[in-house]
Image (spheres, helix red, strand yellow):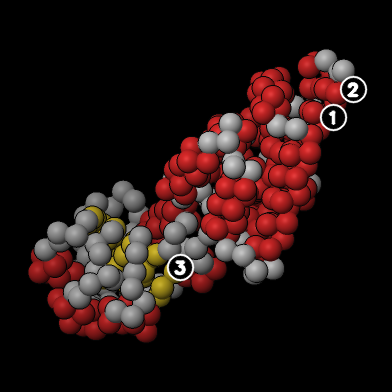
Amino acid sequence: MENVKKHIKEQQFNNIYLICGEEEYLKRNIKKNLSEAIVSADDNMNRSYYEGKNINFKEVIDLCETMPFFSDRRLVLFENTGCFEKACDELLEYLPELTTSTYLVFVEEKVDKRSKLFKLVKSNGYVCECNHLNNDSLMKWILTRIGKENKKITRDTMNYIINSLGNDLEKISCEIEKLLCYTLNKDVIEIADVDAVCIPEITGKIFEMIDAMGNKNKEKALELYYDLLSQKEPPMRILFMLSRQFNIMLQVKELSDKRMSKKEIEEKLNMKGFVIAKTQGQLKNFTHKSIREALEKAIELEEAIKNGNMNEKVAVELLLIEFSC
């Protein structure tokens, strides 16, 4: 990615680019910035766009051979052609002969790195892989975005955002924008601000999952889990959210046993009323001992995953099964 930024800054481009990977936010931004740097967005005479798997490559090759119209460059942009998953002989034969005034940018969801076309582009062009950022890179991205608004944020709060929302940069970006609006009159963004406006979609399913565990409905708990997996929620994030909710349950249980009112518990834990109310409802099906055991088990499984001793998908299944029976 840094190389692409350098190409744009220096206006020195490869004739072929492949942008691929699972991080859609990065792919979209690189596609936009790169394509507009090669040929401006309003130059319709020298920009062409093809999408999907039913492309007439004879027509494309004829276009590539056409000289740019009052410009030094012609851009042809492709999205999700599937050419890097299967044989594409026409492109494979033509690309080594590509005219120097034509620039091709491919944006693909899936690629086979063993394919001849991938190897050709890698050796004769530039492959930009946009995978999900690791925690340190995500924190750097969050710091940069928040810094543009002259705001500050602690490492703990950034960790909380990432653990709550996962590593999907699209989702994090949307939530950061909401946070910036919410904290318009504040200099420092805190965990309480995240809780106030960044309730992840996963939260509702986590409540339902714990309800199912409390009701000893193993099938329902697993069904909800597999549904979250089908929505591409990372198992580690699900485990973190389960662990977090068990921790909240433990605190609410202990404060309720001290006969504190719902309002007092809200203030003590700095949480919204509906979270406390929902948690108090869940406590009816759990003892203090069972909550503590579930929390300790969740923490134990997290450590096992981080140490490479446990598959993360299996770990969550084990937790759900053990405390649903």
Type of the residue with mark 1: Glu
Q: Residue at x 51, y 71 (%)?
A: 3
Q: Which residue was labeled with disc 2?
A: 258
Q: Which residue was labeled with disc 1?
A: 254
Q: Nearer the viewer, residue 18 or 37?
A: 18
Left or right side of 77 for 90: left
Type of the residue with mark 2: Lys
Q: Where 306 sits versus 189, above or below?
A: below
Give the alpha-carbon distance from disc 2 to disc 1, as whole Å. Answer: 7 Å
Residue 118 in sight: yes
Q: Where 4 sits versus 278, above or below?
A: below
Q: Residue at x 51, y 67 (%)?
A: 1
Characterize the local packing of mark 3: few (<14), some (14-19) or many (20 or more) Cα atoms within 10 angstroms: some
Q: Nearer the viewer, residue 162 or 312?
A: 312
Image quadrant where one finds the C terminus: top right
Characterize the local packing of mark 1: few (<14), some (14-19) or many (20 or more) Cα atoms within 10 angstroms: few
Q: Please tell me which of labels 1 and 3 falls first in the chain.
A: 3
